[in-house]
Amino acid sequence: MLRDAGGVTPEQTVWSNDRLRAEFGLPPGDAGAVLHLLQPQASTVRCQRQQ
């Protein structure tokens, strides 16, 4: 994956390729992440880092 121009805050980073888009540094507390599987079947996975 390559670093994408996405992200709303400095803590949020977005990485993507033709099959997957990953967003890190999401609320709450910049510990959330979302993975968007684009191929072969579109789906979304959300996760939260335990502190």
Image: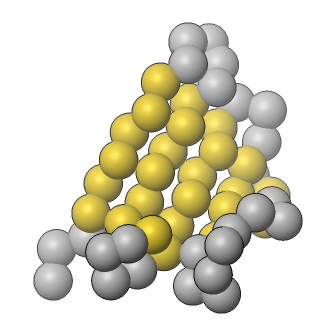
Q: Is residue 21 left or right of residue 50?
A: right
x, y percent for residue 22: 58, 52
Q: How is the image coloured?
A: secondary structure
Residue visible at 70% across and 30% down? 19
Instruction: Between residue 13 and residue 40, name the one nearer to us.
Output: 13
Please tell me whether residue 19 is drawn above or below residue 48 in the rendered image. Answer: above
* Residue beneath the point at 33% across and 83% down: 29
Q: Residue at x 30, y 54 (%)?
A: 47
Location of residue 13 (image quadrant): bottom right
In the rendered image, the vertical position of residue 41 relative to residue 26, given as above or below: above
In the image: residue 10, left or right of residue 2 = left
Residue 27 x %, y % = 38, 72
Q: Which residue appears farthest toward the left when viewing the image?
A: 51
The quadrant of the rendering that contains the C terminus is: bottom left
Identity of the residue furthest to the bottom in this view: 10
- Total labels: the figure holds 0
Query: Residue 12 appears in which quarter of the rendering?
Result: bottom right
Of 17 and 10, the residue lying toward us? 10
Image location of residue 28, percent across then percent down = 31, 75
Residue for point 84% across, 65% down: 5
Judge whether residue 43 can be spotted in this image.
Answer: yes
**For this view, does 21 lie left or right of residue 23?**
right
Judge left or right: residue 20 versus residue 44: right
